[in-house]
Image: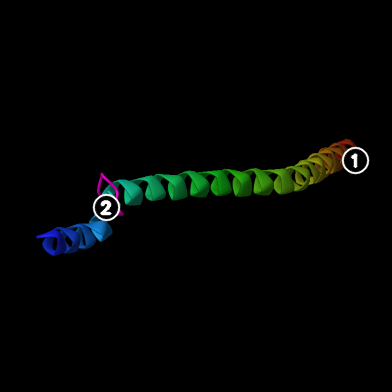
Amino acid sequence: MTRRLSLLLLACLPLSACSDEPENLQAKADNLSRSLENKADVLERDASNGVDAAIAPLDNEANALLAEAGNGAASADNGVGNAAQ
């Protein structure tokens, strides 16, 4: 009888190492998915901000050139108009 009890206890030892609550793989997958989505959102915002920051000086320069060209065109029109008079 003691031998049977010992074998029973020995057989139960691996089970005692298991956690009380089984691992919830779906919850872990959901948490990992949310975490990855958050990281992707942060990376997308950072990339967008970097692109916007790189474009701003080029936009300013393009606008300045357009304004300069517009002023030059207006001056040329005035010159033609004055010459015709």
> Which residues lie in the magenta part?
16-22
Label placed on residue 30: none
In 3D space, how far apart are the residues under numbered discs 1 and 2 (Cα atoms)? 103 Å
Q: Which image quarter holds the N terminus?
A: bottom left
Is 1 rendered above or below residue 80? below
Seen at 23% across and 56% down, the residue is 15
Residue 60 versus residue 31: which sits nearer the camera?
31
Q: Is residue 41 left or right of residue 54?
A: left
Q: Is residue 33 left or right of residue 42?
A: left
Residue 7 versus residue 49: which sits nearer the camera?
7
Seen at 72% across and 44% down, the residue is 53
Q: Position of residue 18 (x, y in %)?
A: 28, 53
- Amino acid marked by disc 1: Ala
- Residue 63 occupies quadrant: top right
Q: Is residue 18 left or right of residue 41?
A: left
> Which residue is label 1 attached to?
83
Q: Position of residue 16 (x, y in %)?
A: 27, 52
Q: How is the image coloured?
A: rainbow
